[in-house]
Amino acid sequence: MSFPTHIVSAGGIVEDGQGNILLVKTHDDGWVYPGGITEVGENLMHGVIREIQEESGIIATVSHLVSVVSNTAIHKWYDGVTDVPTKVMFDFVCRAEGGELTTSEETSECRWVPKENVLDMITLPAIRMRYEAYLNFNGSVNYLEYGTAASTELHVKLQRHI
């Protein structure tokens, strides 16, 4: 029997308490909110807190879950050869508790951006859709399913509140 392979990741929409959201500029995807793949033995909330600190230097705590997102398409990695399996992502709203903005091996810039200006900076359609789900959060967790043929093509398959 072969088990399916899924990447599990967590994203952190970090609020500073003054109306700003933390964005990091990655080498491949431009401006995004911090997040990444959880490590073996790591729970989702610890994973998102670790990713936020690694990518930006900011220490954060998790407030609440805002979205569960599935990318059900297999697509090519940046190398154009490696298949990226389906992915399940959990987006959390987080609060900044301390730390200093700093870059990492994954990021070239970090900054606080007014909440209403974030979409002016995010160019990836999937990240934009996930941030819009945060903006439209009404207390029910968003469930989003999409497929990507490439990083710039987005095919929304399902969107609902649970």
Image (cartoon, rainbow, N blue to C red):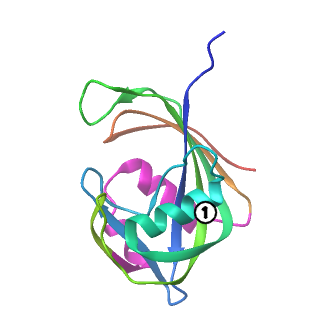
Residue at 63% x, 54% y is: 44
* Tag 1 residue: 92
Q: Establish if 127 lies above or below 31.
A: above
Q: Quadrant of residue 46?
A: bottom right
- Asked whether residue 115 appears in the rendered view, the answer is no
Q: Residue furthest bottom?
A: 18
Is residue 157 shown above or below 47? above
Who is closer to the viewer here, 1 or 33? Answer: 1
Q: Is residue 41 magenta?
A: no
Horizontal arrangement in the rendering, residue 34 relative to residue 121 (left or right): right
User: Quick one: label 1, few (<14), some, or many (20+) residues within 10 Å?
Assistant: many
Screen quadrant of the N terminus: top right
How many callouts does the rendering have? 1
Residues shaded magenta: 111-139
Asked if the stretch drawn in magenta spans residue 113, the answer is yes
Residue 92 placement: quadrant: bottom right
Q: What residue is shown at x 29% (from left), y 52% (from top)?
A: 29
- Left or right, residue 22 beside residue 96: left
Is residue 86 placed above or below 64 in the rendered structure? Answer: above
| Residue at the spot 56% in from the left edge and 66% down from the top edge | 49
Quadrant of the rendered image containing residue 33: bottom left
| Secondary structure found at label 1 | strand
Question: Residue 10 or 2: which is nearer the viewer?
Answer: 2
Q: Amino acid at mark 1?
A: Phe
Residue 25's x, y, as percent?
A: 29, 64
Would you say residue 41 is visible in this rendering? yes
Residue 38 appears at what percent x and percent y? 55, 48
Pick the residue in front: 82 or 125: 82
**Placement of 91 over or under 151, stated as above or below:** below
Percent x, y of residue 64? 69, 67
